[in-house]
Image: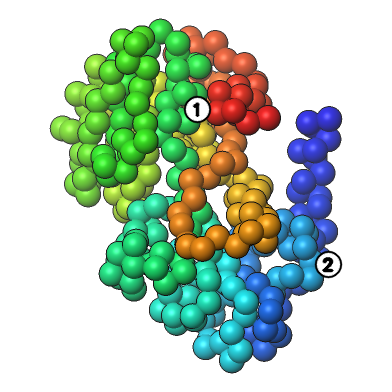
């Protein structure tokens, strides 16, 4: 049944794209949710198709122009859903005066834009701007690492923001687990900061940060971990395929699920204040080649996802 569902999802999304093409800005009507997207291709198209498939008559879609700009809205929609960081910025710049929900945006990206356009995250929330973070919580990445490496006791956390990383999370102290944190700076050669913690850890967790720092750090993390034979638990499918042992990440279908969950909750009883949402849906990716090299026995990725869901009290 699971295989059937996995096969049908992309087919349904493709059909939704054909049946419900994106509307132009002139087509946007009052009372509908307006989706503003950074692009109409790739994962953006997949997310939009999935959202529209759930309620075809509810959404209008417009994309940013070639310059990343959004034309002023002639008539304000009931609310706005932004897909992607550039779309979020374009909408924040316009200050549309209606509730905004931003998806496919990292915590660091939202923090940056909220500070730029609303002075702070609290300022953005006060203006009715909510966000569903793309970042998976540290606790979830840690739990996957603990399932794969149950004997691990020293765990390194490589992050661009320690305060955000440690929020609402405590390791298994009763099992003698200790977490060490290292802030990954914008230095293009962060070997001096990364090497010691990777070398002494049973596994390390790589968390995202600012894009420029994240891309540079990933290369060094994978290089050093390969030399020290230290497993890496990362935050993206690409990271796992590039040399991390495993990853917990938000696939397009997960983003769709989280969007629809928030929309459904709002429909059932409108929330009085805007808020930020930690992603509830997630996917797991394993690198079996790396697992073989490190001699880590692994099951199917779906089994780990189900175990993590059960640990979080989800069915």
Q: Secondary structure at mark 2?
A: helix
Q: Which residue does the image show at 76% across and 38% down from the upper left?
A: 6
Nearer to me, 43 or 227:
43
Q: Which residue is mark 2?
A: 19
Label 2 environment density (alpha carbons within 10 Å; few <14, some 14–19, many ≥20): few
* Quadrant in which the C terminus appears: top right
Q: Position of residue 121 (x, y in %)?
A: 34, 61
The reply, left or right, for residue 45 in relation to residue 98 is right
Q: Position of residue 115 (x, y in %)?
A: 30, 66
Q: Position of residue 123 (x, y in %)?
A: 34, 67
The reply, left or right, for residue 155 in relation to residue 271 is left
Q: Which residue does the image show at 53% across and 21% down from the upper left?
A: 289
- Whether residue 306 appears in this view of the structure is yes
Above or below residue 251? Residue 22 is below
The colouring scheme, among rainbow, by chain, secondary structure or one colour, is: rainbow
Q: Secondary structure at mark 1?
A: strand
Distance from Cα at disc 2 to Cα at disc 1: 36 Å
Q: Which residue does the image show at 55% across and 28% down from the upper left?
A: 312
Nearer-N-terminus badge (2/1): 2
Q: Which residue does the image show at 60% across and 54% down from the upper left?
A: 262
Tally of numbered discs? 2
* CB within 8 Å, label 2 to label 1: no
Query: Which mark is drawn over residue 24?
Result: none
Q: Which residue is mark 1?
A: 246
Q: Position of residue 265 (x, y in %)?
A: 64, 54
* Quadrant in which the N terminus appears: top right
Residue reaching furthest to the left: 192
The reply, left or right, for residue 273 in relation to residue 216 is right
């Amino acid at each position: 049944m699971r295989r059937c569902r996995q096969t049908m999802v992309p087919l349904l999304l493709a059909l939704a794209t054909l049946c419900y093409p994106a509307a132009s800005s002139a087509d946007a009507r009052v009372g509908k949710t307006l989706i503003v997207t950074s692009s109409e291709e790739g994962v953006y198209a997949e997310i939009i198709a999935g959202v529209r498939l759930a309620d075809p008559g509810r959404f209008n879609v417009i994309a940013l122009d070639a310059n990343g700009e959004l034309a002023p809205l002639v008539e304000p929609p009931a609310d706005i859903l932004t897909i992607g960081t550039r779309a979020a910025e374009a909408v924040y710049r316009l200050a549309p005066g209606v509730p905004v929900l931003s998806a496919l945006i990292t915590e660091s990206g939202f923090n940056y834009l909220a500070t730029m356009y609303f002075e702070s995250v609290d300022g953005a929330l006060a203006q009715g701007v909510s966000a569903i973070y793309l970042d998976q919580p540290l606790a979830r990445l840690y739990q996957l690492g603990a399932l794969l490496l149950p004997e691990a006791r020293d765990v390194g956390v490589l992050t661009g923001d320690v305060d955000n990383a440690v929020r609402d999370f405590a390791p298994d102290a009763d099992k003698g687990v200790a977490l060490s944190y290292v802030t990954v700076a914008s230095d293009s050669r962060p070997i001096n900061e990364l090497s010691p913690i990777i070398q002494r850890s049973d596994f390390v967790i790589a968390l995202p940060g600012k894009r420029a720092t994240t891309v540079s750090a990933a290369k060094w993390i994978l290089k050093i971990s390969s030399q020290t034979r230290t497993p890496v638990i990362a935050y993206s499918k690409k990271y796992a395929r590039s040399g991390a042992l495993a990853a917990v990440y938000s696939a397009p279908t997960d983003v769709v699920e989280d969007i629809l969950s928030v929309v459904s909750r709002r429909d059932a009883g409108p929330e009085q204040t805007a808020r930020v949402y930690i992603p509830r849906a997630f996917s797991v990716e394993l690198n079996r080649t790396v697992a073989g090299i490190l001699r880590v026995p692994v099951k199917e990725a779906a089994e780990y996802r189900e175990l993590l869901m059960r640990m979080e009290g989800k069915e």
